[in-house]
Amino acid sequence: MFVPSSDGVEVAVHDLGGSGRPLLFSHATGFHGRCYEPVAHALADRFHCSALDYRGHGITERPPDWSVDWGRYGDDALAAARHVAPDGGLIGFGHSMGGAGLFMAAHRDPDLFDLIVAFEPIVFPPPGPDTPSLESPLATGARRRRRTFDSIEAAIENYAAKPPLGSFTPAALRAYVEHGMRPDPETGGVTLRCDPEHEARTFEQSGGHPTWSVLPDITIPVVVVAGAVDEQAPAAIAALIADEFPHGEFHRFDHLDHFGPMTHPEEVAALITEAVDRLVRP
């Protein structure tokens, strides 16, 4: 299903199955919605799960010559959320960039969500003397990313042999590759759907959106989850983000890293279920 967003973008919304109240997965930079299929599978008896592909990711095209603007990712999240839950009552799970997208959507339409669970969301506070430094080589790494492989199986074999994707569960890795690549007519192989330059620019613009300033206006319960704290990783600001919400919580799990939804999908599913049972009315 494709739903209209801003700039003429048609946002892909994937039905991941299950039954129960609606839940929307919002993915990290460079990923796509179907990466969360293993988490959705573990939630299938409680939730009807959907996931979106942000512009330039998965099968959602970006506008020609579009300069990355994180506010437009908020447009995509809002469009998908309204499609999945037109009457509200939505549970949101946002990973990294996807957490910021859901926060933007919740601020713009306060009646959409009953709860957001955000795994190491990317929302930067105004810089100050106590603000952790999060400078990283992520954009450089994205531009160096290998784009093409001979086949899906060759890509899986390559990624499985090295970090960070080598720590993904087999199902999560296969979902990332199978739905994150497209046939390449020039080589006869496959190539990344998310162009490395687009991914790099998304990283570079991550500190430019003003979402931090609206967090106190989001009055639904928000659970912020982080793995082990590293000064050079998003976990370093997760507790600060949680403190900005009127009904925010912070939970830390030192055995997880930034890719927890892909390395421990059943545990992340249990975290979501526990939060819903505790914080949302039936």
Image: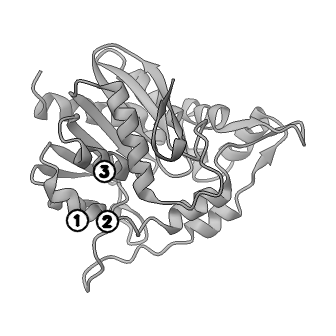
Of residues 232 and 74, which is closer to you in this image? Answer: 74
The CA distance from mark 1 to mark 2 is 6 Å
Question: Horizontal placement of 237 versus 274: left or right?
Answer: right
The residue furthest bottom is 129
Position of the C terminus by quadrant:
top left
**Residue 244: which disc?**
none
Question: Horizontal placement of 161 versus 207: left or right?
Answer: right
**Label 2 secondary element:** loop
**Label 1 secondary element:** helix
Can residue 206 be seen here? The reply is yes
**Residue 210: which disc?**
2
In the rendered view, tell whether residue 255 sits above or below residue 168.
Answer: below
Which image quarter: residue 70?
Answer: bottom left
Residue pictured at 65% horizontal, 58% vertical: 65
Instruction: Look at mark 3 in the image and give the residue it sits on.
Output: 104
Instruction: Look at mark 1 in the image and give the residue it sits on.
Output: 213
Q: Amino acid at mark 3?
A: Met
Question: Horizontal placement of 60 versus 269: left or right?
Answer: right
Quick one: label 1, few (<14), some, or many (20+) residues within 10 Å? few
Q: Amino acid at mark 1?
A: Ser
In the rendered view, tell whether residue 95 sits above or below residue 3.
Answer: below
Residue 93, how many percent across, how many down? 33, 39
Label 3 with label 2: CB-CB less than 8 Å: no
Question: Horizontal placement of 151 versus 43: left or right?
Answer: right
Comes first in the chain, label 1 or label 3: 3
Of residues 164 and 48, which is closer to you in this image? Answer: 48
Q: Amino acid at mark 2?
A: Pro
Residue pictured at 22% horizontal, 65% vertical: 213
Label 1 with label 2: CB-CB less than 8 Å: yes
